[in-house]
Image (cartoon, rainbow, N blue to C red):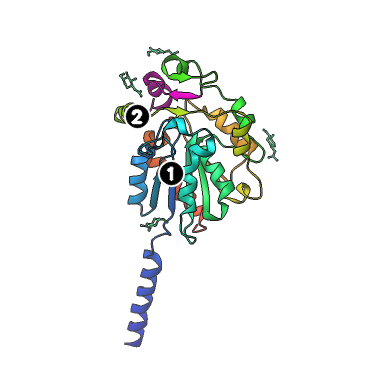
Amino acid sequence: MAIYNIFIMTVAILLQVYSRPTTAAHFVLVHGSGHGAWCWYKLAALLEQAGQNVTAIDLAYSGRNEIPLISVRTIDGYQEPLFTYLECLSPQDKVILVGHSYGGYAISSAMERFPAKLTGAVFVSAFMVGPNLTFNQLGASFNPGASFFNDSKYIGDPPRIVLFGPNYLATKLYQNSPPQDLKLANYSVRTTQFFYGELTNRQLLVTNERYGSVRRAYVIGGMDMAIPPDSQRLFIASNPPEIVREIPGADHMVMLSTPQEFCANLLEIAQVFTGSR
Ligand SMILES: *[C@@H]1O[C@H](CO)[C@@H](O)[C@H](O)[C@H]1NC(C)=O
Ligand SMILES: *[C@@H]1O[C@H](CO)[C@@H](O)[C@H](O)[C@H]1NC(C)=O
Ligand SMILES: *[C@@H]1O[C@H](CO)[C@@H](O)[C@H](O)[C@H]1NC(C)=O
Ligand SMILES: *[C@@H]1O[C@H](CO)[C@@H](O)[C@H](O)[C@H]1NC(C)=O
């Protein structure tokens, strides 16, 4: 009888240990230029089905954010909704930032401002500044190309106020994504700003002590036509993250063209960051 009881207790303990869900992470998703929280709809649903906590941010004048574009004059102002969100997190909450495309700048700044609130940061087909790669150095190597100027609406040389055109969206951003997602973009993208100059460079400076203390991963969109994989590898080479993954079939919109693969990668990266593997 005693042996039977010990057996039952052992089984109960083992069940408890092995059925414990791997620690849920809280992912905070930051969109790229012209986009909004809406572009994460597939990935957010997948992460939540996997038991994770997800928050998708709308930066200034993006998605449902109602601040007018004209009232935001600096990149700090554009990124402010992310900073406010992180400021208001309760002190025991730690999150994993995921920054896409131009949203890579937002999560870099957030890493510099709030390193203690972060479990890690994941750049996906994103611009990534670092202590060894300033905004000015990085921006100098980037040109959106002829197909951008072909049908996008823009003001400035280089372009400062921008609305992506349908041909640019179809051929450079969404070429591997389902037509429904391209349609969603056609209905949802908004006019955005690209920032330049010394003030922008200064606002995006990051240090080894703060930014460098946050664990970092990079996910390359293998068929990205907007920020080509070779450019992404240059960001990585001058500022190597702890983890680098590549999704071969992904276009620029990694979260829409290859959501399952991207979700699986994020779950594995989160396990490394939280030390649960
Ligand atoms: C998700 O995170 C937010 C902010 O930390 C928290 O308020 C909320 O309770 C979390 N939700 C779940 C389901 O853990
Ligand atoms: C310019 O746009 C038109 C249609 O809007 C398209 O047919 C053409 O291929 C584009 N050219 C380039 C270089 O992208
Ligand atoms: C949406 O598609 C229509 C028809 O092709 C086009 O005129 C319009 O400029 C597109 N809007 C955006 C934001 O791509
Ligand atoms: C800084 O970046 C350059 C390439 O831009 C790279 O060759 C160099 O190794 C980097 N230095 C450090 C300390 O990471």
Location of mark 1 (residue): 29
Where residue 273 appears, as percent x and y from the top left, is 52, 53
Q: Is 17 or 101 nearer to us in this picture?
A: 101
Q: Upstream in the sequence, badge 1 or badge 2? A: 1
Q: Quadrant of residue 232?
A: top right
Is 247 situated above or below 11? above
Is 207 situated above or below 136? below
> Residue at 37% of width from left, 69% of height from top?
16
Classify 10 Å Cα crowding around label 2: few (below 14), some (14-19), many (20 and above).
many
Tell me if the residue at label 2 has its CB under 8 Å from ligand 3.
yes
Label 1 to label 2: alpha-carbon separation: 17 Å
Q: Which residues are magenta?
A: 160-177
Which amino acid type is marked by label 1? Leu
> Residue at 44% of width from left, 39% of height from top?
59
Tell me if the residue at label 1 has its CB under 8 Å from ligand 1.
no
The N terminus sits in image quarter: bottom left
Location of mark 2 (residue): 185
